[in-house]
Image (cartoon, rainbow, N blue to C red):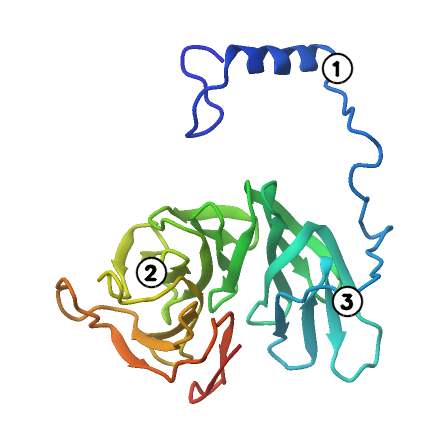
Amino acid sequence: SGDDPQMPLNGEPLSADNIHTIRTWIAQGASDDSPPDVGVKIDAENPPVYSTPPVVTSIDYSPDGKLLAVSGYHEVLIHTLDGSVPPKRLIGRSQRIESLAFSPDGQTLAVVGGTPALFGELQLWNVAEGRLLHSATLALDTLFGVSFNADGTHVAFGAADNRLRVVKVETAEVTMRMDAHSDWVQGTTFSLKNDHVISVSRDMSMKLTIVATGQFVDNITSITPGALKGGLVDVIRHPTREEVLAVGSDGEPRLYKIFREKARQIGDDFNLIRAYSKLPGRLCDLDLTPSGNRFVVG
């Protein structure tokens, strides 16, 4: 309230009636009068109970190949590949886990997701101890496409609020935000030198951003209408070259140079190195072998 209300951030000020309702609620003690049967409490003491197999949205191997992290409902399960111990259950606040990734040293697991239309959350876990290091609510809708930089100090991810964010792992502090996308940001990866981050979106673009400043640099993909036939879903960088592979709704994997070497001209697709054989449906995920010589798409 007041002459220059600070909330909602970047939104229209609340009406006088809404402000009166909130003020009255606070004056009455701000008690939570939600019915007791709204939602089921799920935490480490009350783990999820599955009556049907859960939707698996993301998996990742640890760098040493000994562990496999698998998304579940309100949780991530850490399996040992030799089956020597029961799966470790990392139970958190988010109902839906959209993306997870091990840090380069395998000690930390980054998890993003949320509860659609309510909140987006980043979780950072100590893998060995199964201990939650940080839980950060960073948007009013789901987060997607988490990735670590090479030294494991930062993670990047997208969101349904069309924003790209970079967060410092040690503190869960947002150190960079980029707002140039016009639709959900669904995949991220860092450049080889870790000074840029690449993001892909349902807006049919792949964008290059400077990590230190959040400055949008370039559309890596063509900006010509019709050059891409649908939104992009995932992106991954080549292990040894400043090149990225991207997939999306049109079913055609494409390999791009990250950095433009000549001035953009309308109609060009200069950064495209190669388009691979088109698959009959949309592509939702991809990965590269450690050598970068082969890739797999789903």
| Residue in the picture at 33% in, 48% down | 180
Give 100 or 19, whichever is nearer the viewer: 19
Please name the residue that numbered disc 1 is placed on: 29
Q: Amino acid at mark 3?
A: Pro
Cα–Cα gap, marks 2 and 1? 48 Å
Residue count near mark 2 (Cα–Cα under 10 Å), binned few <14, some 14–19, many ≥20: many
Residue count near mark 3 (Cα–Cα under 10 Å), binned few <14, some 14–19, many ≥20: few
Please name the residue that numbered disc 2 is placed on: 205
Please name the residue that numbered disc 3 is placed on: 53
Cα–Cα gap, marks 3 and 2? 34 Å
Left or right, 38 with respect to 95, comes to: right
Q: Which residue ends up furthest to the right in the rendered image?
A: 45
Tell me the SS state at disc 3: loop
Cα–Cα gap, marks 3 and 1? 42 Å
Residue count near mark 1 (Cα–Cα under 10 Å), binned few <14, some 14–19, many ≥20: few
Of the numbered discs 2 and 1, the one sitting upstream in the chain is: 1
